[in-house]
Image (cartoon, rainbow, N blue to C red):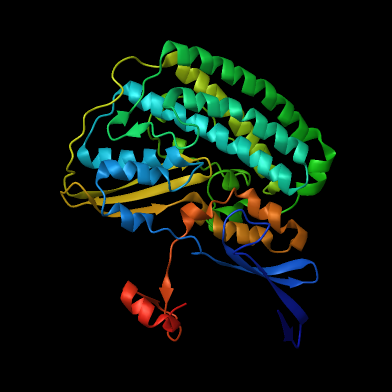
Amino acid sequence: MTEKDSTEGERFHIPVGPQHPALKEPEHFLFEVDGERVIDVKPRIGYIHRGIEKLGESRNYTQNIYLAERICGICSHSHTTAYCIAVETLLGLEIPDRGNWIRTYVFELERIHSHLLWVGVAAHEIGFDTLFYYTWRDREHVMDMLEQISGNRVNYAINTIGGVRRDMTPEIKERAYKGLDAMEERLKYYTDVVLKEKTIAARVAGVGKITKEQAIELCAVGPNARCCGVPIDVRKDDPHAAYPEIPFKVITYDGGDTLGQVIVRVLEVFESIKMCRYMLDNMPSGEIRTKAKRKVPPGETVIRVEAPRGEDIHYLKSNGTDKPERWKVRAPTLGNIPSVCERLKGGYVADIPIVLAGIDPCFSCTDRVVLVDKNSKRRINTTLTELRLNPSQVI
């Protein structure tokens, strides 16, 4: 598509998505380009909205744990942790220390898994498939460790309202130490490659760059913000689970570009390995869960956790029954869309895949539907029957 402007000449509009080789999930971005340069970009979300929040209102609190887990495959433990803490807060439950520590241990293993997966995907996007194969081979270590403690490699199903479902045995502990040692040894090699391999720096240094002020203004979260020098991390800012008792440092980098996103994630894996070792060394004894009531007293709460991609927010409202009245989720990718659009401006068309990949997007866990009247451009509420009878009035 093209449009002519008397002052700026001819510019092209390039649609990317919802189905496109540069996207792993359906989403749409409309790029305005001048030659090879991106001038502007407009996102259009909602292609893979699954109605999970509404579905949760018809299921009881325990059933919703497994629904929350399927919001995102890679951040599944993050979502169940936020959801369970929300329910536990409304119930006034005190979680046993050991259960909290096991919950946090799985949280950090998930972060390692997510970051290693992302480094591989980023390497693939810039044509460095050898690094992609290596990282995906070695992330098997962390997936084996997750399977040992939970019984599952991806959706771990270890969280429950009141604590966790499985305990850590001495055998699991011993194998975990070996797995962490193996991962750390391989990670040293990847760090050396990322920091010293000239082809990586030449491809991603300066690409998709924004300033610290822009990251703050556009509400960037997670590694997407920390690579700009913004020390934002819910684990420190609003500690949850066992994080108040576990020493760690927030990894930041001042580059603000895609190279900074790679460096932050690689260094965060080192930090997560240290945290996992600390938790294995200092794991408290005792019970792993507390029995919870089926019905939750009326009330509402907002819980934040630091998912691998950034701040994950769960709002929960109860009405005294065994089912929530309202459940709303703000996944990290939704918070990062404004900043990634800014990162794309001024860059080349060829940089679009790696800049989009830089925030580690998960559109499935982000998407929601907003109906807007075509004439007034105002948000509207409608029923499914009305939408079927008169679909042309909304966009």
Q: Which one is in front, 237 or 119?
A: 119
* Foreground pick, 61 / 181: 61
Provide residue 212's location: percent of width, then percent of height.
Answer: 61, 51
Tell me which residue sits at (44%, 86%) in the image. 375
Percent from the top left, x then y, of residue 265? 62, 37
Residue 84 in the image: above or below residue 178: below
Residue 102 location in percent, x, y?
40, 25
56 over 233 or under it: above or below: below
Q: Can residue 253 be seen in the rendering of this structure?
A: no
Quarter placement of the N terminus: bottom right
Nearest the viewer among 160 and 260 is 160
Snapshot quadrant of residue 252: top right
Left or right: 28, with 208 as reference point: left
Q: Is residue 96 left or right of residue 222?
A: left
Q: Is residue 8 above or below residue 303?
A: below
Residue placed at 28% from the left, 19% from the top? 287
Q: Residue 203's x, y, as percent? A: 79, 48
Q: Residue at x 33, y 41 (%)?
A: 65
